[in-house]
Image: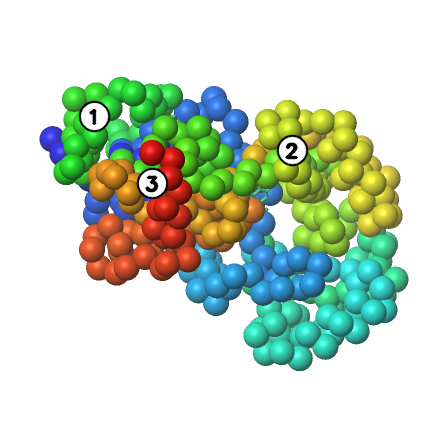
């Protein structure tokens, strides 16, 4: 029997794409290796339309954000679980200068649409250093990936369309009209292997730029804040009084191990932001599948039209995946072209050079 899509990797990229294609009536088989470390399980899952020290609008915010709210909301409804937390992000100003700059920026309607008109600074004062007040970003929140991912896995397991395995690229046959794996033919193989993409024999030539990141879980003595706080680092209330705090960004020693340096870096920033005593109760490390030009890698392999990639989601997998999975599905069904900025055709020259 010919199935439509064989998807390798069950992080946020593979899960969102599998769900998207399934909803469009396609037959998908999802292969995951749940014992391997993944970016998605290390991630905080935050989506934020205004990011960075300079309060910049996230690339494609107008398309991504309405889409992601709808997308995750529909899965919650369909599976009867909760993992989408719509939460504002409070950004205490670092100085009077920053306050002035940010306030000037919020006169721009494209920024103002994501900023709360009046911020209640007093509610944060007992817990957070905010001598100059702060600004509250709306339309933001977080996806609880350790809830979302197993739920998607259970959905496809139930339909007998999930395979728990280490996919071996040497054990499949690539043809022009599909791939054959374990005696079954699929119209397309789609690699959603995130930070493992650099070692993938089919896509290792792509210019990945992996970024290691670490977070801490802390238990503050008292903490009456339900929003995400962001000033250089984020403090995000998760569950049972625990807050996730992070993150680090490093481009060296790319591995999945937590480090003392990582912990010290986060704690140093935390101490200048959080007023109350806390205890560290956990630490995680992950690798962000970032790319040299900071745009996703989506599209068909230059030599094998039956092989594709949906990856390179970098620091923003949660917000990029739903919209671009939909765009990719349209492309795979022959309805629309892929946007040039994300299509791997932009770097095909590297493939030919590598031959
Ligand atoms: C510390 C940290 C904090 C972050 N915070 C955020 C955040 O707040 N918001 C946000 O949007 N993003 C965040 N990110 C980035 C986010 O993690 C990524 O954008 C996203 O998780 C990438 O998803 P992915 O599915 O491409 O990769 P992954 O989640 O790594 O998934 C790839 C999967 O492929 C599987 N796989 C690989 N090869 C094989 C094989 N041969 N056979 C079977 N399975 C295979 C792996 O097991 C893995 O599960 C953060 C990342 C880090 C490290």
Residue 167 to residue 335: above or below: above
Q: How many labels does the image show?
A: 3
Query: Residue 20: x percent and y percent?
Result: 32, 48
Local SS, label 3: helix
Disc 3 designates what residue? 352
Q: Can residue 346 be seen in this view?
A: yes
Residue nearer the viewer, 94 or 115: 94
User: Percent from the top left, x then y, of residue 181?
Assistant: 22, 25
Q: Which mark is residue 173?
A: 1
Q: Which residue is at a point 76% across and 39% down the rendered structure image?
A: 266
Q: How is the image coloured?
A: rainbow
Quadrant of the rendering where the C terminus is positioned: top left
Q: In which quarter of the image is the N terminus?
A: top left
Q: Does the residue labelled 2 lie within 8 Å of ligand 1?
A: no
In percent of width and height, residue 116 lies at 66, 70
Determine whether the residue tagged by mark 2 lies in a helix, strand or loop.
Answer: loop
Spatial CA span between label 3 and label 1 = 22 Å
Q: Is residue 32 above or below residue 54?
A: above
Q: Residue at x 80, y 34 (%)?
A: 264
Question: Element under label 1?
Answer: strand
Going by the image, does 148 lie left or right of 349?
right
Q: Mark 2 points at which residue?
A: 252
352 relative to 157, above or below? below
Residue 48 horizontal side relative to residue 151, left or right: right
Distance between the alpha carbons at the discs numbered 2 and 1: 36 Å
Could you tell whether 154 is left or right of 226 in the image?
left
- Nearest to N terminus: mark 2 or mark 1: 1
Q: Is residue 184 above or below residue 155?
A: above
Of 290 and 333, the residue lying toward us: 290
Say which label, 3 or 2, has the lower sequence index.
Answer: 2
Q: Residues within 10 Å of mark 3 (few under 14, many from 20)?
A: few
């Amino acid at each position: 029997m010919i199935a439509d899509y064989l998807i390798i990797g069950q992080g946020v990229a593979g899960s969102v794409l599998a769900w998207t294609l399934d909803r469009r009536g396609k037959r998908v088989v999802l292969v995951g290796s749940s014992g391997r470390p993944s970016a998605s399980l290390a991630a905080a899952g935050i989506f934020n339309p205004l990011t960075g020290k300079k309060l910049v609008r996230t690339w494609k915010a107008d398309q991504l954000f309405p889409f992601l709210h709808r997308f995750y909301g529909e899965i919650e409804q369909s599976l009867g679980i909760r993992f989408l937390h719509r939460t504002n992000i409070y950004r205490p100003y670092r100085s009077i200068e920053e306050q002035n700059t940010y306030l000037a920026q919020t006169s721009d309607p494209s920024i103002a649409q994501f900023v709360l008109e009046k911020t209640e600074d007093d509610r944060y004062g007992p817990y957070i250093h905010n001598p100059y007040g702060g600004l509250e970003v709306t339309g933001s929140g977080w996806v609880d990936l350790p809830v979302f991912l197993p739920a998607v896995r259970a959905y496809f397991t139930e339909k007998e369309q999930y395979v728990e395995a280490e996919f071996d690229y040497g054990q499949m046959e690539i043809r022009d009209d599909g791939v054959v794996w374990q005696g079954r033919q699929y119209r397309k193989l789609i690699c959603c292997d995130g930070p493992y993409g650099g070692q993938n024999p089919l896509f290792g030539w792509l210019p990945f730029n992996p970024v290691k990141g670490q977070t801490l879980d802390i238990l503050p003595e008292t903490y009456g804040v339900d929003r995400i706080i962001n000033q250089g680092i984020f403090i995000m209330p998760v569950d049972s009084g625990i807050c996730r705090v992070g993150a680090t960004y490093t481009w060296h020693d790319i591995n999945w191990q937590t480090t003392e340096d990582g912990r010290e870096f986060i704690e140093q920033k935390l101490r200048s932001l959080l007023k109350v005593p806390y205890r560290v109760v956990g630490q995680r490390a992950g690798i962000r599948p970032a790319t040299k030009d900071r745009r996703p890698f989506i599209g068909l392999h230059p030599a094998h039209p039956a092989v594709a990639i949906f990856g390179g989601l970098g620091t923003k997998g949660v917000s990029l995946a739903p919209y671009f999975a939909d765009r990719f599905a349209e492309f795979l069904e022959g309805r629309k072209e892929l946007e040039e900025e994300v299509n791997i055709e932009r770097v095909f020259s590297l493939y030919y050079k590598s031959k």
